Amino acid sequence: MNEKDTICAIATPPGIGALAIVRASGEKAIEICDKIYDYQGKRLAKQPANTIHYGFITNNSKLIDEVLVSIFRAPNSYTGENSVEISCHGSIYIQQEILKALIRNGARQALPGEFTLRAFMNGKMDLSQAEAVADLIASSSEASHNVAINQMRGGFSSELKNLRNKLLHFVSLVELELDFSEEDVEFANRNELKNLIQEVKNVIDMLSVSFEYGNVIKNGIPVAIIGKPNVGKSTLLNSLIKEEKAIVSEIAGTTRDAIEDVIVIEGISFRFIDTAGLRDTDDVIESLGIKVTHEKISKAKIVLWLADAGNCLAEINQGINEIKAILGKKQRLFVLINKIDKYEEAEIDLKYGKINFKGLDKKDRVILISAKKHFQLDRLHDELVNAILPEKQDDVIITNIRHYEALQLASKALERALSGIDKNLPGDLLAQDIRETMHYIGEISGEITTDEILGNIFKNFCIGK
Amino acid sequence: MNEKDTICAIATPPGIGALAIVRASGEKAIEICDKIYDYQGKRLAKQPANTIHYGFITNNSKLIDEVLVSIFRAPNSYTGENSVEISCHGSIYIQQEILKALIRNGARQALPGEFTLRAFMNGKMDLSQAEAVADLIASSSEASHNVAINQMRGGFSSELKNLRNKLLHFVSLVELELDFSEEDVEFANRNELKNLIQEVKNVIDMLSVSFEYGNVIKNGIPVAIIGKPNVGKSTLLNSLIKEEKAIVSEIAGTTRDAIEDVIVIEGISFRFIDTAGLRDTDDVIESLGIKVTHEKISKAKIVLWLADAGNCLAEINQGINEIKAILGKKQRLFVLINKIDKYEEAEIDLKYGKINFKGLDKKDRVILISAKKHFQLDRLHDELVNAILPEKQDDVIITNIRHYEALQLASKALERALSGIDKNLPGDLLAQDIRETMHYIGEISGEITTDEILGNIFKNFCIGK
């Protein structure tokens, strides 16, 4: 990866549209663009930054398109380098020809995420912010968008930086003691140090805890719909889909064959697991074996178990028992008594209204619904959202497993440091644990980094970002 | 359609990308954008035209994204109106939220092609140029791109305008004669008029002739691959696809199930008809009936008929006869003697080299190939391109059936005028034919237009253009 190169890429989504943007960044980006730009002898290199210029792009003196070229100059650009954005007609042919023309004149095709990598390298953002750019682009619900944009705008990284600097201050004092080890001085007050370490550990542990919620927000909450044949599973799924217009799986252009349907409720994505058999088919056709049901349950955070309002209570209690036996502690069970439109209200009341089902936790729910008549589905919505909300942290949310792992390691090092202070361990051992903590925190923001870490992060970006 | 409204739309291709652009146009476009834009109190309305501004977009005071806003002012914009282009992170959620924010603050979603319609209404381009914008965006090969950009840059419309003005001059003189009809004067020299009409008719007929080629360039040349089972049809298709990297059907993101494969050779698209059964299957499986073959042939401009080099001459001659019997005059037949790698060169020479097949026209071709070994496929490429090139006009090419129909009608009116002059018909009848010609020519460039014509043209545009 040569950082002196001028890189170029199509930045807009692939395909045909009214407009598309081809961008280039690097010391010579504007000069290279000048070679393929033509308008009455105008030279882009002489134009002021942050201006837009009408003109023509030619490749090998063949007219490619009428375009608008936006000019940015270092350091005031996304990458921090000289940059151009060529806004052209959105035909695939034109986009590719402009890219070819730039490459012919000295630019090279950018690697995935290379624009953002340069922004990081040039100090325009730290590493966790760079990672948030990819999350932001991929975010498809309000909740995941909020988490990503908060992280991109600084989020937890400034707080971590602040804590890291405080640790640095103390570790320097501890290390200073080592130089005077024969004199047995103590520059770093052990009580203050202990308080600081505890403070840092609290923040880090809070961030770690937020990961579970953050991860769920980022990837959607997995929900399983299970129940015996004919109990109304596909009707329920179809009714939910009909009520919520925003089905992410359709918006994102994925095919109907997608195994999961995503429904966004109050800005939170719920991923309905393995609904391929449910979407368009009758319940009758679908006859999933026990094994498939077990797999579905194991992947779900919330399990919707449908029963028929005509079932007897013993049947339902047995079903609850069977499911609860395989549910983990963190999984939620919603017992949905379906088809209540078919039974007399009184009868239902009698059967279920005043009876507590056995084996349910406080966080489990029983809801009487009619999937067909859309009865009580609004209550189901509310309960789905509520099942997630209590875990919600205030602002600072970790969504990235790389950050989570670094935080876990930092927390362990801090624990060692704390017990070290209690045991009056020598300063060099303390210093080592604190340095290790700082290393892990630094990895999150990118103050500490390696080519391998960078490579792993940016390879998952789209080209053009 | 209210032309005072400020309209807005996502202008970049649908989907997820590094960047996306939401554009707005109308008298209040910049003011509306100011309501959702925030950066240290900056007001976009006070910024100069053709400048770019970093800032934040909020919707209902919720932060949506960090963006760049480009400002354009009437009349120096695409539409000729005040316009903004908001360059945001290319997440679907962000694109839609920005659109919603603009709409909440007084813009409305643009209709298909409405930006370009406004450009036409505001005199930024004539109607044929506006139509070329849609063609340009849809163009996927060099040839179709050339035709579209030529038309967008003015193409034939300036020439037509020029001819129309000349006709106007003469028709005015003819009509002036009518005012002095009792004096039997002749202001418009009948010989000069006849020459002019002939000149206009020549241009119009030349344009009409170009339509067939233009249409083929725009839509691709339909090619059929036919032949008995096991003769190597799928091998040939796969080899052609492998040689030409640019398969439009793949680039455009259409699925593998597409019935047609498009292969671009020297910038010209060849559409291989009904290849669904050919792409991935063995020849053995495929057993198309006579009816399907007839249908394929009837749609093709070039028919590739494969025979096995091991077939005897009588068999091949019979096959040629059968196909030629159903081929139209303008259709081309390529007899491809396949699998020549399997036979001794001498034997092939003996069998075919010096023998003329019966029933072939001068424009038909016999090529000995090996689809499997890619032998002589370069020659097949050349012949495919050559089969189209002789029809190629120099510059001015009509691709639009609306233009073609108008030209046909204009030509007929001119013919009537010509014969009218020869028959010494009275001036008012002459004037009527010339006026009619002018009407049809005017329809092409949009000097004459109706809401119906405009509606038909712009409904096929994408939204955002």
Image (spheres, coloured by chain):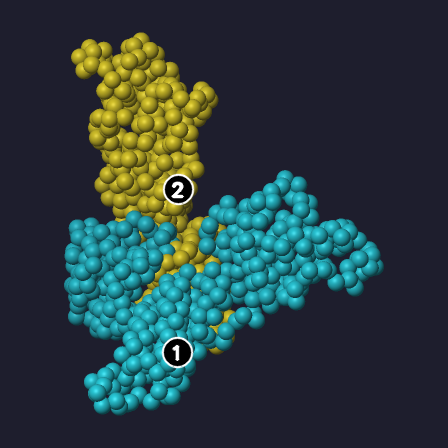
Chain colours: A cyan, B yellow
Q: Is residue A104 above or below residue A414?
A: above
Q: Quadrant of residue A452?
A: bottom left
- A402 to the left or right of B391: right
Given the image, on which type of amino acid does mark 1 rest?
Ser
Label 1 or label 2, whichever lies nearer to me, is 1
Given the image, on which type of amino acid does mark 2 rest?
Ile
The count of marks equals 2
Q: Is residue B177 above or below residue A440?
A: above
Residue A76 place in picture, x, y as percent: 25, 74
Classify the position of the C terminus of chain A by image quarter: bottom left
Residue at the spot 22% in from the left edge and 51% down from the top edge: A100
Q: What is the secondary structure assignment of the residue under circle 2?
A: helix
Q: Is residue A65 above or below residue B87?
A: above
Q: Nearer the viewer, residue A406 or B348?
A: A406
Q: Quadrant of residue B349?
A: top left
Residue A62 place in picture, x, y as percent: 20, 50
Q: What is the secondary structure assignment of the residue under circle 1?
A: helix
Q: Which residue is mark 1?
A: A419
Chain designation of label 2: B
Residue A79 place in picture, x, y as percent: 26, 68
Q: Is residue B359 above or below residue A381?
A: above
Q: Which residue is mark 2?
A: B401
